[in-house]
Amino acid sequence: MRTQDEEIVPQYRGADISVGQGKQARLRDEVSRLAGADGRGQECPRSYSTETTGAMPTCGVAELGRVEYCEAEGLQLELVRARREGEVPDLLLLLEHDPVVTVGRGTEDVGQVVDLAALRREGIPMRETSRGGQVTYHGPGQIVGYPIVDLQALKPDLHGYLRSLEQVLIDSLAEFGYEAERVEGLTGVWMGKRKVASIGVAVRRWVTYHGFALNVTCHSPAWSLMEPCGLSTEQVASLDDFGSPPPVPGLHSAIIEQFGAVFRRRPERVAREELLARAVF
């Protein structure tokens, strides 16, 4: 169900975005400018931030372990409020979910893209979510990242933000010898012709939430029961489909380092208990 202070911005270049209400005309102008006359958009800069002087701002990083999906969404909404009010710095949450299929706001008829009866037989719950995009699966063997970032303090550019999240993952995987890449017209990160990471975000008054999901050893019957992000099951892959994957702690470290590099933030660890205490239901 759509909340009162959120509005969906029409998708462009495969962008999975939901944004908060506010200066709607300004947002539409921004989308039009970014998409351009041919709808292809612009390439993002290597570093997203426009800051060039002064001390590098911090970014709190919390590795939360396994968190139930609805609990994580409640936590994000509380942190978005706290970020808007200056109570916390930019944040990056890294976690894993119990098995769940999530339905983004770009899904017009969930019954056309999900085998609902089979999903119930498998005992996998389905949740509507405030992010943009279509349906996808979250579960064990997947690294989920939720950046809570004030884009006004960086650059209010939704297209650039999506491209920068892709760059974080591409550079992180490169540390382990993977040749990951973008695919023109689609959002996410690919290896060969298969998608290993999905991205779907939401924004409230230019503060981001939701984010990315990187498949490491993520294999579930749920993939075959839906069209993940509008793709066929065969187009989705995990890192272990390409050989023995790196350990999750090593991938976490690479993602944290590259997130700091791309967004020009200095990562600082935040206690798991400190953030989970903020969760609202």
Image (cartoon, grey):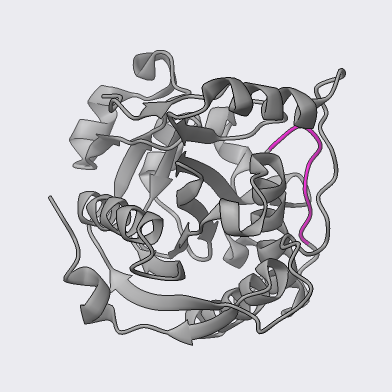
Q: Which secondary structure class fits the magenta region best?
A: loop
Q: Residue furthest left?
A: 281
Looking at the image, can residue 95 be seen?
yes
Instruction: Reply yes or no: does residue 182 show up in magenta.
Output: yes
Residue 25 locus on image (x, y percent) = 59, 20
- Please provide the residue range marked out in magenta: 180-186
Instruction: Reply yes or no: does residue 64 show up in magenta.
Output: no
Residue 277 locus on image (x, y percent) = 16, 71
Q: On the picture, is 104 further left or further right than 23?
A: left
Name the residue located 62 percent from the left edge and 61 percent from the top edge: 241
Name the residue located 42 percent from the left edge and 65 percent from the top edge: 141
Looking at the image, can residue 246 be seen?
no
Q: On the picture, is 39 further left or further right than 23?
A: right
Q: In front here: 20 or 235?
A: 20
Name the residue located 59 percent from the left edge and 74 percent from the top edge: 255
Q: Quadrant of residue 91?
A: bottom left
Residue 186 locus on image (x, y percent) = 71, 35
Q: Quadrant of residue 82?
A: bottom left
Q: In front here: 56 or 77?
A: 56
Quadrant showing the N terminus = top left
Residue 234 locus on image (x, y percent) = 61, 39
Q: Check the image and report above or below for 237 versus 159.
A: below
Q: Quadrant of residue 246?
A: bottom right
Q: Check the image and report above or below for 17 versus 175.
A: above
In this rendering, the count of numbered labels is 0
Name the residue located 44 percent from the left edge and 55 percent from the top edge: 219
Q: On the picture, is 219 further left or further right than 11?
A: left
